């Protein structure tokens, strides 16, 4: 009696399609088979990107265990999901002829966003994210997980411009929308589009059966790609692309390594004769490493260690360099600014006394009026940087203080007259105008810009957050809890932070650099 081959597979629609393809090929050759679906961690945990799950072989581990327990004879995988080092006792038994290797952009409405500064693209892949940002650095990337059906539905229900999929997956399920095209410029994941079969190393009979459906050229190409990946020590947590193919007795190879934000890219292309390709992966990996790849990989490893501190304002590269080496930082803008339109009547009559507490107010004024139109007699500011900007763009500043409360107290004693115009945000502290009003100084408030909350949910492992205004604290609270250390840029921000957090630290001077120094003092 011939052997019954139990085929282990994930139970997603795409995984089952792949397993059934293997089943059909084996049964066509006269072998008896049985499908054994199991659910993987990667299918169960859909609220986190793959690179955050912290598991090697997130889509393969459950099948590996089933095979080692002899519950299945073979396992069918998307080869790009399989770790480059297989568990002891398990080997690659076959690779089927490769499908479409490309990534595919599915878009909504039209493709005009590709030439525009602002667009939102969804993907759960660091590689796709980094390559997209390298090509379109001003676009915004959002995470996307789930099976093909759910990801297409999320795109349909969202305000995103598009989402990136593996073309092979869409094609195999006959789900490629008309509003889509392949990204020929994007280097795919190593072994993308290939289906792999694993078996127990000790099961010689099953391995011999699988060898009957192995495709040699696909095995050659994917082996080179996966060796390249392994030599760069990458996985789901590194933006690495690789593509090899055999054509006219030659092996062609493309490889790329990028920084997470896509700003740095190191790539290589090389062609060698078939039969002399054994050193191709090592040569290409060494080429990448020697041209800055080692530093890039070191930075990627550092970022994968976990984030010590999160900044509620996007940090510049120079600011990131100020952190001690033991600190890993992450940042995004928790506040979005929208400048308001102001009519000429704001300047009629020309205000004598003006309060400007932020650079956003300066930008709003200069967006609406020329510097020649802003003939303020007395300008009062909060912050040295705001003062410098005002004096560079508008005119001489009469007096500045580090915070709005101190400025209000100064004005109570020294203001010329009893009226002041305050160019402020729609979300502003009551403290300054309240103090002035209580001391019979009339405040005319002009909403120069609007502040919008844009909070993100940070990882539970982050226990320190940097804040730069009461609004960043309020925005943070919309998505996150209180169990953190709050590093604050000044007393006003610290006052708001004290309403929510037990441990609040205040920088010596109100600058981002001073907040970073405060963080360094805590962790080192």
Image (cartoon, grey):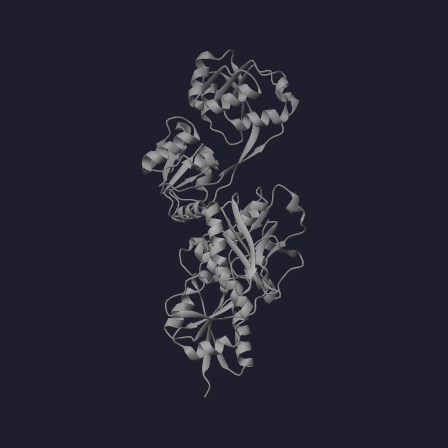
Task: Give x and y (percent) for residue 287.
Answer: 49, 50
Position of residue 279 in the picture relative to residue 100 (left or right): left
Image coordinates for residue 220, horizontal then vertical, percent: 52, 65
Q: Quadrant of residue 476?
A: top left
Q: Residue at x 57, y 19 (%)?
A: 394
Residue 323 seen anywhere in this rendered image of the structure: yes
Horizontal side of 395 relative to 507 (left or right) equals right
Rendered view: 121 above or below 58: above
Seen from this angle, which residue lies furthest bottom? 1
Residue 64 lies in what quarter of the image?
Answer: bottom left
Regarding residue 228, the answer to whether it shows in the image is no
Image mark count: 0
Q: Where 306 sits versus 250, above or below?
A: above
In the image, 71 versus 194, the foreground residue is: 194
Instruction: Identify the residue at image location x=58%, y=54%.
Output: 164
In the shown orientation, is residue 301 left or right of residue 25?
left
Q: Residue at x 50, y 54 (%)?
A: 284
| Front-most of residues 473 and 20 | 20
Q: Position of residue 222 (x, y in %)?
A: 51, 63
Answer above or below: position of 188 versus 423.
below
Quadrant into which the C terminus falls: top left
Viewer-proximal residue among 59 and 501: 59
Image quadrant where one finds the N terminus: bottom left
| Residue 59 rendering spot, x and y as whole percentages | 45, 63
């Amino acid at each position: 009696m011939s052997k019954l081959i139990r085929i282990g597979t994930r139970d997603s629609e795409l995984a089952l399609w792949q397993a059934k393809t293997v089943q059909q090929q084996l049964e066509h050759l006269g072998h008896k088979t049985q499908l054994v679906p199991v659910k993987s961690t990667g299918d169960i945990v859909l609220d986190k990107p793959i690179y955050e799950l912290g598991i090697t072989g997130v889509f393969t581990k459950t099948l590996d265990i089933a095979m080692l327990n002899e519950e299945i004879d073979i396992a069918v995988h998307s080869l790009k999901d399989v770790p480059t080092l297989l568990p002891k006792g398990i080997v690659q038994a076959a690779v089927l002829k490769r499908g479409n290797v490309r990534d595919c952009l599915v878009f909504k409405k039209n493709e005009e966003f590709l030439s525009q500064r602002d667009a939102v693209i969804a993907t759960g892949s660091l590689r796709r994210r980094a390559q997209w940002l390298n090509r379109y650095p001003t676009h915004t990337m959002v995470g996307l997980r789930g099976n093909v059906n759910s990801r297409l539905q999320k795109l349909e229900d969202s305000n995103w411009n598009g989402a990136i999929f593996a073309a092979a997956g869409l094609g195999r399920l006959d789900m490629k929308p008309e509003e889509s095209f392949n990204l020929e410029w994007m280097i795919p994941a190593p072994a993308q589009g290939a289906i792999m079969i694993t078996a127990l190393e000790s099961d010689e009979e099953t391995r011999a059966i699988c060898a009957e459906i192995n495709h040699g050229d696909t095995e050659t190409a994917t082996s080179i790609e996966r060796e390249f990946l392994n030599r760069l020590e990458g996985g789901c947590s590194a933006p690495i692309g690789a593509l090899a193919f055999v054509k006219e007795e030659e092996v062609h190879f493309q490889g790329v390594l990028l920084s997470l934000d896509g700003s740095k890219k190191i790539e290589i292309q090389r062609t060698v004769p078939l039969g002399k390709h054994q050193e191709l992966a090592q040569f290409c990996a060494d080429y990448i490493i020697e041209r800055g790849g080692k530093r890039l990989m070191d930075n990627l490893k550092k970022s994968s260690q976990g984030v010590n501190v999160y900044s509620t304002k996007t940090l510049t590269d120079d600011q990131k360099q100020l952190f001690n080496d033991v600190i890993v930082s992450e940042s995004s803008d928790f506040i979005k600014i929208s400048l308001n339109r102001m009519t000429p009547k704001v300047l009629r009559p020309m205000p004598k006394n003006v309060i400007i507490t932020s650079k956003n107010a300066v930008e709003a004024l200069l967006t609406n009026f020329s510097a020649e139109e802003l003939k303020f007699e007395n300008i009062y500011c909060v912050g040295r940087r705001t003062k410098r900007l005002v004096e560079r763009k508008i005119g001489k500043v009469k007096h500045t203080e580090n915070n709005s409360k101190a400025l209000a107290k100064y004005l109570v004693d020294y203001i010329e007259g009893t009226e002041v115009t305050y160019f402020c945000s729609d979300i502003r502290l009551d403290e300054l105008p309240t103090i002035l009003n209580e001391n019979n100084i009339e405040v005319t408030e002009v909403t120069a810009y609007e502040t919008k909350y844009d909070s993100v949910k940070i990882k539970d492992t982050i226990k320190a957050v940097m804040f730069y205004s009461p609004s960043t604290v309020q925005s943070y609270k919309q998505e996150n809890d209180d169990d953190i250390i709050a590093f604050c840029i000044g007393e006003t921000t610290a006052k708001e932070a004290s309403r929510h957090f037990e441990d609040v630290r205040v920088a010596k001077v109100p600058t981002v650099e001073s907040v970073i120094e405060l963080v360094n003092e805590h962790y080192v």
